[in-house]
Image (cartoon, rainbow, N blue to C red):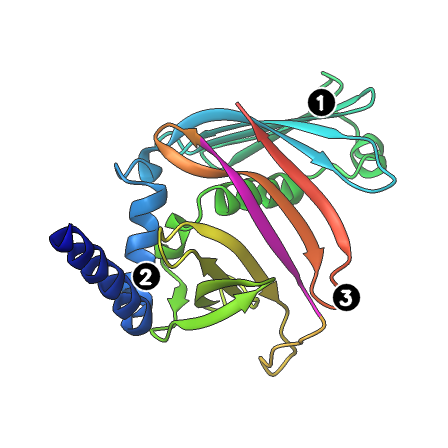
Amino acid sequence: MKPFICACILIFSFKFLTAQNISGASLLKMATQYHDPNHQWNTFKGEFDVVMEMPNHTKRTSHITIDLPAEYFKVKATRDSVVTEYTIDKGVCSMSLNGKTGLSKAELFSNNLSCERANMYKDYYTYLYGLPMKLNDKGTRISEKVEKKTFKGKDYLVLKATYDVSVGSDVWYFYFNPETFAMEIYQFFKTDEEGNLKPDSGEYIVLSETETINQIKMPKVRTWYYNKDNAYLATDILKR
């Protein structure tokens, strides 16, 4: 029995020391290994649904198609009786409203449809569901210092990410389970014109449950809150 106890102590001690001394690059590597153990993200090709729930709004169901090798993205969103579709195929944008294409400028304007919005959705879904692997993208600056923080009574290893000006100006923090290196929270803040973080801006997103799609562990439930007052914003539920 003693050898078993000693082994457990050694394993625990190793994890503790790792949590204390880990670098940002090492934490990202281990988190990526947890979420994408077979290195599938860069060749990801799959489909899934995201159901969004918001206070005082009816549910919106979005069917997402991502094919990274083919440079293809499509989102078909349904809320009540309105169905919108956006497609980006090798950089070429197309869209429809309730199955109708060739929309007039008035129809596009009144329904807030545009290629700019199509690209926003592509970036939004591929970024959030591609985390933490997307933190390896060019233009992302990962802090080498890993912080230990307690959030809502639970300990985390926290990774800070900033971005080249051409990519974005927000400051992001990613909270990882110190035992498994699973990503469980992420948080972002806006910055002012001088690049200083605005503490009352932005949101934090709590992740719970896991859905495995094409061998990649993705958060099943994402619950969004405002940083400034912890007010609830929305919930996204991933469904296969």
208 w.r.t. 107: above or below = below
| Circle 1 residue | 102
Q: What element carries label 1?
A: loop
Where residue 103 appears, x then y in whole percent? Answer: 76, 25
Q: Is the magenta stretch mostly helix, strand or loop?
A: strand
Numbered label attached to residue 237: none
Disc 1 vs disc 3: Cβ atoms closer than 8 Å?
no
Give amino acid for label 2: Leu
Give the magenta-colored segment's residue range: 201-211
123 w.r.t. 90: above or below = below
Give amino acid for label 1: Gly
Q: Which residue lies furthest to the front in this view?
A: 1
Where residue 142 appears, x then y in whole percent? Answer: 38, 67
179 w.r.t. 155: above or below = above
Task: Give me the residue at 41% from left, 51% from top.
Answer: 132
Where residue 7 appears, x then y in whole percent? Answer: 16, 55
Q: Nearer the viewer, mark 1 or mark 2?
A: 2
Quarter of the image for residue 74 reads top right
Numbered label attached to residue 27: 2
Q: Closest to the observer: 54 or 103?
A: 54
